[in-house]
């Protein structure tokens, strides 16, 4: 009898945990294949610290082949899944087509930037879901400060020193908090930048920062942001984006060259392509993470609408905590489907949340205990070190160095604006086309890649449809 073939699509929090747990449970009795566009697991919660120059990019990545030695890694992106033939069709990093046969399939494709029908946003904003976007923002912010320093036009200098972040959830709040510290440090220690004042705006249509969290955590974050100098504007968003700035919903036009889009996420469009029942773009599954009518198909993480047994009638939110825990349950249930152990329903207990606000500041409520200031900062960093599946020593070392040495504000220019479009189904990949022509038109003043640019990953050409999750 041949060994069962298990294919996992996606190596985010859910996919990685599924592969890790299955590898331990299978003990060589199954062929486990992990299909992912990159060869690393990305620890997303620390991405704002990469953009702010605290952590080097590789610190927030964990090698898939290095930490999952008994799992076959296939680099590529799923183009189509034939549920009847039990095959996953994919495109590799050099454009080659491939097919994976399976007996069990785990859909853990994750999520992408959520888009809204606002004029100019898709053309002028950048998301914050992948490492290329964080690297681009780090370079871009540094470049704007340097260009502002060289400008003799006060209005143009002010525009370059103005940074607009839309979305006051976890990501947007942390990006604005870390960004203000990053730009202030660049200005304060430079004698030729005396009088320059970087300005960060945080916008959201909600009535408070971090609307999904406890109000006390929200107040803590709001206080820290305002004391730091962040211009927090709740009940306000972007009405239109242009090359010269953004028009706000209150009628004000803000001159800026930076628009960071953190309004939320939507499920990967792969889920919608399957023709299975959906809930706001997410695959409907039962409490055991199985797709009804397809007993060989499991789904978890942001791509799955998992019933919340603690809140009957609702579904678990799209968070890293849920994805990580669901991955473990999914692995056990796949093993149970082959007769190894008993299947489990996914249940969760709220262990609290942490929000890193930069420096020694944070907002946290571990086990329901509300903390702020230095205590919250210590708990937050301790939580991240414990949650990371690797690189803990390197991350801790970078934190120590950041505490005693000034940050390196240097732009490497490795990721250009046109290579990280907002409207993409693959935020984890920088768009680097073959043939020396950009996949999207570069904005005014942005040079196109030269003929010496090496071909890079090829992304499927379908445009993801708008989700409403």
Image (tube, rainbow, N blue to C red):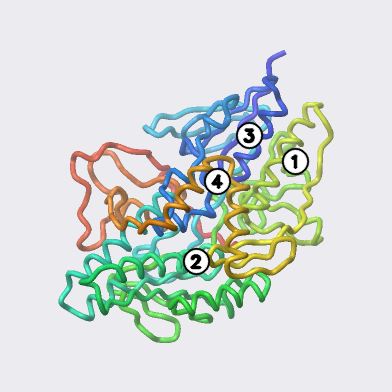
Whichever of labels 3 and 4 marks the residue nearer the N terminus, that label is: 3
Which numbered tag is attached to residue 361? none
Q: Give the quarter of the figure containing the N terminus.
A: top right
Identify the disc placed on residue 172: 2
- Mark 4 and mark 1: Cα distance apart in space: 18 Å
Residue drawn 61% across the image and 77% down it: 219
C-alpha span from label 4 to label 2: 26 Å
Q: Is residue 450 above or below residue 30?
A: below
Helix, strand or loop under label 4: loop
Is there CB contact under 8 Å for labels 3 and 4? no
Say the numbered circle drawn on residue 293: 1
Please tell me whether residue 26 is drawn above or below residue 164 in the rendered image: above
Question: Do the residues under discs 1 and 3 have CB atoms within 8 angstroms?
Answer: no
Distance from the alpha carbon under mark 2 to that under mark 3: 30 Å
Of labels 1 and 3, earlier in sequence is: 3
Question: Most extreme residue toward the bottom, as rendered?
Answer: 251
Dot 1, how many residues are within 10 Å of its Cα: few (below 14), some (14-19), or many (20+)?
A: few
């Amino acid at each position: 009898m041949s060994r069962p073939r298990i294919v996992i699509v996606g190596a985010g929090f859910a996919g990685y945990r599924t592969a890790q747990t299955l590898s331990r449970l299978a003990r060589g009795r199954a062929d486990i294949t992990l299909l992912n566009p990159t060869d690393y697991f990305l620890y997303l919660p620390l991405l704002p610290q990469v953009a702010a120059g605290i952590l080097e990019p590789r610190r927030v990545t964990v090698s898939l082949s290095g930490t999952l030695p008994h799992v076959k890694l296939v680099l590529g992106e799923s183009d189509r899944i034939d549920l009847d033939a039990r095959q996953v069709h994919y495109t590799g990093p050099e454009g080659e087509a491939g097919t994976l046969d399976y007996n069990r399939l785990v859909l853990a494709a994750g999520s992408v930037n959520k888009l809204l029908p606002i004029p100019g946003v898709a053309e002028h904003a950048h998301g914050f879901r992948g490492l290329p976007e964080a690297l681009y923002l780090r370079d871009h912010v540094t470049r704007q400060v340097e260009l502002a320093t060289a400008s003799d036009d006060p209005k143009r200098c002010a525009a370059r020193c103005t940074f607009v972040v839309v979305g006051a959830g976890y990501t947007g709040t942390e990006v604005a908090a870390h960004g203000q510290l990053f730009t202030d440090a660049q200005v304060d220690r430079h004698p030729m930048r005396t009088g320059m004042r970087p300005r960060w705006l945080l916008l959201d249509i909600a009535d408070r920062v971090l609307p999904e969290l406890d109000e006390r955590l929200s107040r803590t974050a709001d206080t820290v942001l305002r004391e730091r100098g962040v211009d927090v504007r709740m009940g306000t968003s972007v009405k239109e984006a242009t090359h010269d700035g953004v028009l706000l919903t209150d009628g004000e036009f803000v001159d800026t060259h930076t628009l960071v889009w953190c309004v939320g996420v939507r499920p990967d469009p792969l889920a919608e392509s399957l023709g299975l029942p959906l809930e706001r773009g997410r695959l409907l599954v039962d409490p055991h993470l199985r797709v009804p009518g397809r007993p060989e198909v499991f789904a978890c993480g942001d791509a799955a609408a998992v019933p919340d047994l603690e809140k009957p009638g609702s579904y678990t939110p799209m968070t890293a905590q849920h994805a990580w825990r669901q991955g473990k349950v999914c692995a056990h249930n796949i093993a149970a489907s082959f007769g190894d152990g008993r299947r489990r329903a996914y249940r969760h207990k709220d262990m609290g949340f942490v929000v890193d606000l930069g420096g020694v500041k944070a907002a946290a409520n571990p086990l329901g205990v509300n903390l702020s200031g230095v205590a919250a900062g210590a708990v937050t960093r301790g939580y991240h070190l414990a949650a990371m599946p690797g690189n803990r020593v390197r991350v801790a070392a970078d934190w120590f160095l950041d505490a005693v040495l000034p940050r390196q504000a240097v732009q490497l220019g490795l990721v250009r604006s046109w290579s990280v479009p907002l409207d993409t189904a693959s935020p984890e990949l920088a768009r680097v086309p073959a043939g020396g022509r950009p996949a999207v038109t570069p904005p005014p003043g942005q040079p196109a890649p030269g003929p010496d640019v090496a071909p890079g990953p090829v992304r499927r050409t379908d445009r993801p449809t708008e989700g409403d999750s």
